[in-house]
Amino acid sequence: MSEALRFKNKLLILGLYLFLLLGNFPAHGQDKQRHSFPIKQYKLGNGLQVILSEDYSLPVVSVVVAYNVGSINESPGKTGLAYLLENLMFQGSQNIGRMQHISFIRRTGGNLNATTTEDKTIFQQTVPSHQLALVLWLESDRMKSLEITAANVEQAKEALIEEIHQRKATELYLESSLTFDRLLYPNLAYSHPVIGNEADVRNLTVEDVKDFYSTFYTPNNAVLAIAGNIDKRKTEEDIRKYFYTIQEGKDIPLLSSLKSSGKKTTVISKESLAPLPGFHIGYRIASPYSQDFYPLKIIEYILLRGVTSRLYKKLIKRIRIARSLSGSIEKRKELATFKIFVSSSNEIMVARSKRVIFSEINKLKSSLVPEKELRKAKNIFKMDYLNQYATSADKAVFLAEAFLSKKSLDDLPGELENYLSVDNYSLIRIMRRYFTNEIVLDITIK
């Protein structure tokens, strides 16, 4: 390709990006099926949920096994189990040696990843499409026969404790973040760190790990999502071959409910490692399963997402009173919170930054968002939403997470439209309903 043609293509791509960003087309009212893709969902006799999505654009296939378990399923005194199990899932099973799972995938030219959050654990692999059976064998073997020995557990514990130490040494605002979570979620299950507490991890036993594994890492507590270049009939045969004989697990324990006073709270925290003063602001908002969540997500983009968001423009770009700004909506099962974090150079700048944030929040309670600004926020959100299934790996994760979040997969083609159809009056209603009783944690330097 000539340099002139490369330059022309770059200009075309840049022009398309600006076209989307500036909102020179309707943000909603388009064909809902435009962004849909084929989905087949069914359940095996042992309770394993299966989701298939064909995509022949590339000769690859992505496999996700997602377990409906995270740190919120841990008991007091036994934190870190979910994170520990993620590590142990690579330490061998009945037919697979220690770390062989990783080497098998890499030998195919594939890649893999795993993640544990407060409410889910996800294992994903992308391989050439003719290697699908290998991945299904690997995943089924550790689902039914994980090797949990004293040596494996002790090794995983030591690695986890080392990671806890590294996190304490490198995350400068860790102390305040953990304190803030305890204020937002007044229940240990929801507020302790995913990685666990060091004292708890040291005291975990082999029996603790085996019991957690047998309870939560079972077919009836998992979803298998496969996206990519697949022969659907052959894929279904292989899924049955490898997963059908795995025994269904016991009933999953119910999560404890979370109660909160709903009162405004302000607390001061002294950080030992923090280089600058700052603050956390949070609001308990509607459940992700609620219709109110759609306007809340658009509010997140108006206030926080990207260099054109209100708070970034005010605090970082224009007035320049904040040194750092971050925040988002955070979901933990049926709970959601709206979080904002700011650090500034001194206490005066901290106070000014806080006033700016509350001023912008109050504006959204009483004033309509200009149409151009609202359209821009929606278009940025739309690009982020579509990127969730831009590749086969993204799509498999997207489908698995959608299932775990209790969404009906039949409703996915219209899901984006629910966000893009949010109007100004919905934004005002939501702001007045949820952005009233803030929780504030002020950070001072020791």
Image: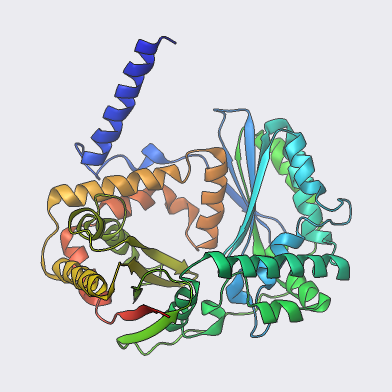
278 relative to 125, above or below: below
Picture layout, residue 352 above or below residue 267: above
Quadrant position of the C terminus in the picture? bottom left
User: At 56% from the left edge and 39% from the top edge, which residue is drawn?
Assistant: 392
Q: Which quadrant holds residue 106?
A: top right
Farthest residue in the top direction?
2
- Inspect this view and state whether residue 229 appears: yes
Say above or below: 112 vs 91. above
Task: Between residue 45 and residue 14, name the one nearer to us.
Answer: 14
437 and 247: which is toward the camera: 437
Asked where in the image residue 322 lies, by quadrant, the reply is bottom left
Image coords of residue 286 (percent x, y):
35, 72
Residue 369: percent from left, percent from top: 14, 58
Please give the count of numbered marks on the rendered protein.
Answer: 0
Which residue is found at the position 15% from the left and 47% from the top? 372
The quadrant in which residue 117 appears is bottom right
